[in-house]
Image (tube, rainbow, N blue to C red):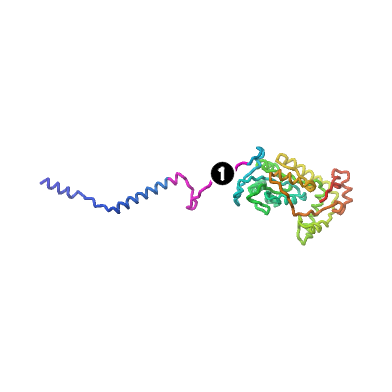
């Protein structure tokens, strides 16, 4: 009797496993495989640390460093490979670039000289950048502006962009240069900037040019337009008709002031890599331009300018009170300016 009861209970507790469908088994295996695959992929992605931006994978291509050109050891500090933010240098990425600055004074031939440089296919001189006061308001804005220029991010009509081999600017001494000469000199030496010091020997001619240019700013004889530089003999002839009257009581102090400022500039930037040029020397001897190209380490080319000289010939024909000027300068250190002349 007891045995019958035990078999009855055993039959009740025994649950028979239902027959499983092959399709259901396959779905379970597939689901398990997918979950495992997703888990493994997430682990791999974390280990590789691939950065995503907006769901898109960003792949960074590491560029090979540019090979240094075969130059002397001292020159390596003056060879640069800018990486502009505004454009890509593309195939010219590994073309070395030299930095330069033309330091000069107004009406010393710097505008004409810069057009000569810009006629070279590999030179970009960006003009009188610091004529705008806000750019020279303090040393921080000056440094920021210089960084943009030398990184090829300062775009002007003179910019050669990706294939530039020498980049620079024209900088007048009275445009913050002398005021911040220590910081700027240090910047030039640290960044490897070569300096071109361009001045005028005959400061009396420079004075006449300044007075004539000042007159033109107000009178505007060229159809109501002021032009510091002209490109036709006709325009030059019109501007040359004006003959200024020079204040003889101020002429010597003015000449002395410019002379002292020039001497200070030569002293302040003597520790930089530099070349000293004079406007008259370039006019008399055009091989000076070959020296400049060698200084900037660019291929030699025949440099040209469309500018036409305004004041030509004898000084006596360019001022109203020539006799008074002669009497004032006679016997002074500046008497040579009365006789020093050239033809062009």
Q: Quadrant of residue 228?
A: bottom right
Residue found at x 59% / y 50%: 88
The reply to whether residue 260 is in sight is yes
The reply to whether residue 130 is in sight is no
Q: Is the magenta stretch mostly helix, strand or loop?
A: loop
Q: Give the range drawn in magenta.
A: 44-68
Q: Where is residue 60 in the image (x, y as percent from the top left)?
A: 52, 47
Q: Nearer the viewer, residue 87 or 54?
A: 87
Q: Nearer the viewer, residue 113 or 52?
A: 113
In the image, is residue 55 part of the stretch drawn in magenta? yes
Q: Quadrant of residue 70?
A: top right
**Left or right: 32, with 1 as reference point:** right
In the image, is residue 126 part of the stretch drawn in magenta? no
Q: Where is residue 280 in the image (x, y as percent from the top left)?
A: 80, 47
Q: Where is residue 246 in the image (x, y as percent from the top left)?
A: 84, 52
Q: Where is residue 25 in the image (x, y as percent from the top left)?
A: 30, 51
């Amino acid at each position: 009797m007891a045995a019958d009861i035990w078999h009855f209970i055993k039959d009740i507790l025994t649950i028979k496993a239902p027959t499983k469908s092959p399709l259901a088994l396959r779905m379970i295996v597939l689901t398990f495989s997918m979950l495992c695959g997703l888990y493994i992929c997430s682990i791999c992605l974390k280990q590789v640390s691939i950065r995503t931006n907006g769901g898109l994978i960003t792949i960074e291509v590491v560029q090979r460093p540019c090979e240094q050109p075969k130059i002397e050891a001292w020159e390596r500090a003056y060879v640069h490979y800018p990486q502009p933010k505004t454009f890509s240098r593309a195939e010219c990425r590994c073309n070395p670039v030299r930095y330069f600055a033309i330091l000069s004074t107004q009406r010393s031939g710097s505008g004409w000289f810069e057009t000569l440089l810009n006629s070279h296919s590999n030179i970009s001189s960006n003009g009188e950048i610091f004529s705008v006061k806000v750019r020279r308001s303090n040393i921080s804005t000056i440094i920021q502006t210089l960084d943009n220029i030398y990184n090829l991010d300062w775009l002007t009509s003179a910019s050669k962009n990706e294939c530039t081999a020498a980049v620079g600017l024209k900088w007048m001494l009275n445009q913050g240069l002398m005021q911040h000469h220590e910081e700027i000199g240090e910047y030039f030496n640290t960044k490897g900037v070569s300096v071109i010091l361009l001045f005028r020997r005959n400061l009396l001619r420079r004075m006449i040019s300044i007075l004539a240019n000042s007159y033109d700013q107000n009178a505007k004889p060229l159809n109501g337009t002021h032009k510091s530089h002209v490109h036709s003999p006709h325009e030059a002839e019109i501007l040359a008709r004006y003959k200024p009257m020079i204040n003889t009581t101020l002429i010597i102090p003015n000449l002395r002031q410019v002379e002292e400022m020039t001497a200070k500039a030569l002293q302040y930037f003597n520790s930089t890599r530099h070349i000293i040029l004079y406007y008259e020397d370039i006019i008399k001897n055009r091989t000076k331009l070959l020296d400049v190209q060698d200084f900037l380490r660019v291929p030699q080319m025949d440099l040209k300018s469309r500018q036409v000289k305004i004041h030509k010939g004898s000084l006596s024909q360019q001022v109203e009170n020539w006799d008074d000027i002669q009497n004032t300068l006679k016997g002074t250190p500046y008497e040579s300016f009365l006789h020093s002349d050239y033809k062009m």
